[in-house]
Amino acid sequence: MRRTLAAAVAIGVLGAVPATASAHKYTVYAGDATQPPKSAPTGTTLNRFLPAKLKVRAGDKVSYLNNAFHTVSVLGKGVPFPAIGVPDGTATYSGINDPQGNPFFFNGLQKFKYNEAVFAPVGSTTVGDGQTHSSGAFGGSETGPGKYTLKFAKAGSYKVLCLLHPGMVQKVKVLKKKAHGQDRDAKVKRRIAKESAAGFKNITKAAKQKVPANTVYAGFESKNATALTYLPDSLTVAKGTTVTFALMAPSEVHNMTFGPSDFVQSFQAATDLFPTGPGTPNQVSPPFIYGSEPTTGPGTWTYSGNDYGNGFFWSPLMDDQPGDPPNGLPGAEKITFDTPGTYTYFCAIHGPDMKGTVIVQ
């Protein structure tokens, strides 16, 4: 789930790891280490830790540079991977009106909030006690990457995860304090460059795949190298065609949002309340859960281009993880276009840069 992508910074060249038992500090990446090449698809990003494997010694620190939007997390023993959104107790949505001033159908339905276990910091920056330690969600800015540092205090094997992007895992082997065989900085740098190049190569190849007729891939990826784009980004169909929007990115969630951008953005600002600290408003925008209108069948809608008087339509979130409702998000959604016109849509998670067009003739 990436909200911003700052300009990537060059990988620093550190000195060699000393042969003594003194603690050392490594620099690695949560996500992109460099900007994608021009040959890569629009919206390309790497939902990967670079490098994927790291060998350090007890007492060493690892700084994670983050140019996108990730977490750096080590889950405690037996702690399951947490959901991004969770029910907000017994609270229900209320007082939310459509563009014509009428209550939306989801008023009175279960309210969801963003999971603090994912988005807020947990524990400390020292791992090795079997407990959960997490940065919470953070990212880069126009001034440079964000940074989060973990100290690995005890020998053992650890998995560093991003709780926003399934499959984004780094395996860290921690040797005893006086052991030999830890990674040298030059080797780490070479791995970062090699794995980054391989990721961009994989997603560039995936962009050439053939999409079935009357189908749009809402995001696609290869080995956690993902493209925040629709494939194809423009689709022409006949009146009455049902288009299948299939999520093809296991590490991401996407949706489709139609309508005037000013209304969509104001609606999202009013209803999608991302927590900025303890006690601040926290609410998942209800269409992410229920859609902006009831379905005409399981995961199916009809779009006329004039819904609610201004063409507003917001589909629920989709993912490419195992399980469909009620066990998980849908993997695909179908929209029948019954009125000629040109309809532009975008992903409400990733913003107007991730957009597509359906031309109905």
Image: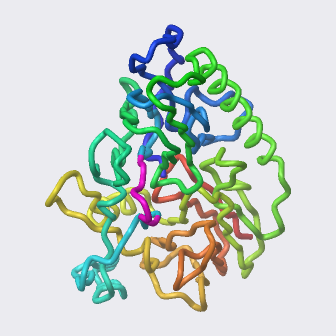
- 272, 20: nearer the viewer: 20
Residue 188 vertical position relative to residue 20 in the rendered view, above or below: below
**On screen, residue 217 above or below 158:** below
Q: Residue at x 41, y 27 (%)?
A: 60
Magenta stretch: residue 307 in it? no
- In the rendered image, residue 243, in percent from the top left (x then y), is placed at 71, 74
Report the front residue among 60 and 48: 60
* Residue at position x 27%, y 76% in the image: 88
Q: Residue 158, position in %: x, y?
A: 50, 46
The C terminus: image quadrant = bottom right
**Total numbered labels placed on residues in the image:** 0
Residue 84 figure quarter: bottom left
Percent from the top left, x then y, of residue 208? Answer: 83, 47
Most prominent secondary structure in the magenta stretch? loop
* Visible residue check, residue 311: no
Q: Report the side of 48 relative to 163 (left or right).
A: right
Locate residue 342 relative to residue 153 in the image: left or right. Answer: right
Residue closer to the observer: 101 or 134:
134
Residue occupying the far left of the picture: 279
Which residue is depicted at the point 55% across and 33% down? 32
